[in-house]
């Protein structure tokens, strides 16, 4: 299947309001390195989150001048400074949704999690917007199948932010061609499937907020640095090897191997950042202090907790639901002290995006 599969017909604009909520996700096998247009250099796999979501309403109005335009509000406030990024997104996707030209849009979005919290808001926001667009497309062309709806929503979201492709469905999704998931695609993400061991559909993610400052390097700059990175090709093949190992362990429910692979991936992502030219160091002393504590707790308590990192200093602490009470006490007593203002967020793996009801 290629991109042409996702080109819709033109359509007669009708007024409509779409309202969707989409979760963020945290990668276990990391996507770092891409070619245009948002084609990943290696496959990635992530946990879809549950409470960390973007909620987006889009009011579609037939345009009086027949010209596409939009206004964007974030948390109730008009945000003209977000417009250029969204304009780039609409330019990238317009050939797949040619019906958009007859519309003027009002887009209102908000997040349930704080800004710069180590939760990828671009993933949830782009996924929620893509779902609103697909909801409109379903009104115009009602015979659409559910699989196509999800795949095209993921395809459009990917063109806004690569990792957003993985924020449509849950509890675990895979994006990028590979030999293990024969149906996986570079164009959109798919769910892991029924072979996922049940322990992973209720996995917990505590996000430890080490540093709430904005990132020193954007993910686009990071992806770009992989083009001339001396270890790039080894990294891309390592991700494939790690995906194979992780997939078997996520079918078998083998938590020891899960811990090993997830932590190796997190540190490999940061190793790429540490060894790019120019290099950048996103982890902080408290990130390392938390990692040390997690390792000690795992050994002393024999509880299979592990960490992963996004492109930032905050730590995602992952653990099975059955250890929730014990791990939450550990966080409060031993890890919160390393967090900015003692702050952390408790989330868990979720089922994916939902259509919201109007109140
Ligand atoms: O979706 P982007 O372009 O913001 O890149 C995301 C990169 C990481 O979050 C570091 C890894 C990933 O796979 O989500």
Image: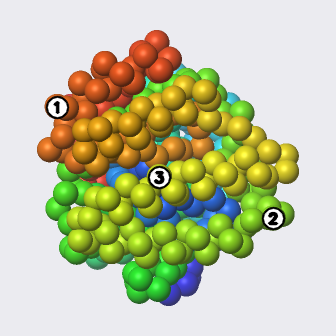
- Marks 1/2 in contact by CB < 8 Å: the verdict is no
Which circle's residue, 2 or 3, is located before the other in the chain?
Answer: 2
Looking at the rendered structure, which numbered label has been put on residue 307?
none
Q: Residue at x 52, y 57 (%)?
A: 265
Residue 177 at what x, y percent from top left? 51, 79
Numbered circle sitting on residue 263: 3
Q: Give SS at disc 1.
A: helix
Q: Looking at this view, is 130 or 103 the one in front?
A: 130
Of the numbered discs 1 and 2, the one sitting upstream in the chain is 2
Tag of residue 325: 1
**Horizontal and vertical percent position of residue 350:** 26, 50
Q: How crowded is mark 2: few (under 14 residues within 10 Å), some or many (20 or more)?
A: few
Residue at 63% over, 71% down: 236
Query: Residue 81 location, x and y as percent?
Result: 68, 31
The residue wearing badge 2 is 230
Q: Where is residue 13 in the image (x, y as percent from the top left)?
A: 45, 58
Secondary structure under the numbered disc 2 in the rendered image: loop
**Which image quadrant for residue 342?**
top left
Q: Are discs 2 and 3 less than 8 Å apart at CB? A: no
Number of marks:
3
In the drawing, does residue 190 fall left or right of residue 117? left
Does label 1 or label 3 sit earlier along the sequence?
Answer: 3
The answer to whether residue 179 is left or right of residue 66 is: left
SS assignment at label 3:
helix
C-alpha distance separating marks 2 and 3: 22 Å
Cα separation, mark 1 vs mark 2, equals 44 Å
Q: Is residue 257 above or below residue 25?
A: below
- Most foreground residue, 128 or 53: 53
User: For residue 288, which quarter of the picture?
Assistant: top right
Question: Does 142 appear above or below 88?
Answer: below
């Amino acid at each position: 299947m290629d991109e042409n599969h996702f080109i819709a017909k033109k359509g007669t604009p009708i007024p409509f309001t779409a309202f969707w909520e989409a979760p963020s996700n945290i990668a276990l096998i990391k996507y770092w390195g891409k070619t245009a247009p948002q084609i990943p250099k290696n496959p990635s796999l992530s946990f879809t989150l549950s409470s960390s979501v973007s909620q987006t309403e889009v009011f579609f109005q037939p345009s009086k001048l027949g010209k596409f335009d939009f206004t964007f509000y974030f948390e109730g406030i008009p945000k003209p400074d977000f417009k250029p990024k969204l304009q780039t997104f609409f330019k990238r996707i317009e050939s797949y949704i040619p019906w958009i030209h007859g519309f003027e849009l009002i887009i209102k979005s908000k997040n349930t999690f704080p800004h710069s919290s180590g939760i990828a808001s671009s993933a949830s926001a782009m996924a929620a917007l893509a779902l609103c667009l697909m909801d409109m497309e379903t009104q115009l062309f009602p015979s659409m199948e559910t699989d196509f709806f999800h795949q095209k929503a993921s395809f459009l979201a990917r063109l806004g932010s690569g990792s957003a492709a993985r924020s449509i469905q849950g509890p675990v999704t895979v994006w990028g061609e590979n030999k293990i998931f024969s149906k996986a695609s570079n164009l959109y993400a798919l769910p892991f499937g029924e072979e996922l061991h049940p322990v992973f559909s209720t996995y917990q993610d505590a996000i430890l907020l080490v540093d709430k400052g904005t990132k020193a390097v954007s993910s686009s700059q990071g992806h770009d640095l992989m083009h001339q990175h001396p270890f790039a090709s080894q990294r891309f093949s390592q991700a494939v090897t790690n995906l194979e190992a992780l997939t078997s362990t996520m079918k078998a429910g083998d938590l020891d191997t899960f811990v090993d692979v997830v932590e190796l991936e997190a540190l490999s992502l940061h190793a790429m950042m540490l060894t790019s030219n120019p290099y950048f160091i996103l982890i902080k002393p408290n990130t390392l202090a938390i990692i040390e504590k997690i390792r000690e707790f795992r050994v002393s308590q024999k509880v299979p907790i592990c960490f992963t990192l996004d492109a930032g200093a905050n730590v995602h602490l992952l653990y099975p639901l059955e250890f929730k009470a014990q791990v939450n006490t550990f966080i409060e007593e031993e890890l919160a002290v390393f967090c900015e203002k003692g702050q952390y967020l408790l989330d868990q793996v979720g089922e994916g995006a939902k259509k919201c009801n109007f109140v």
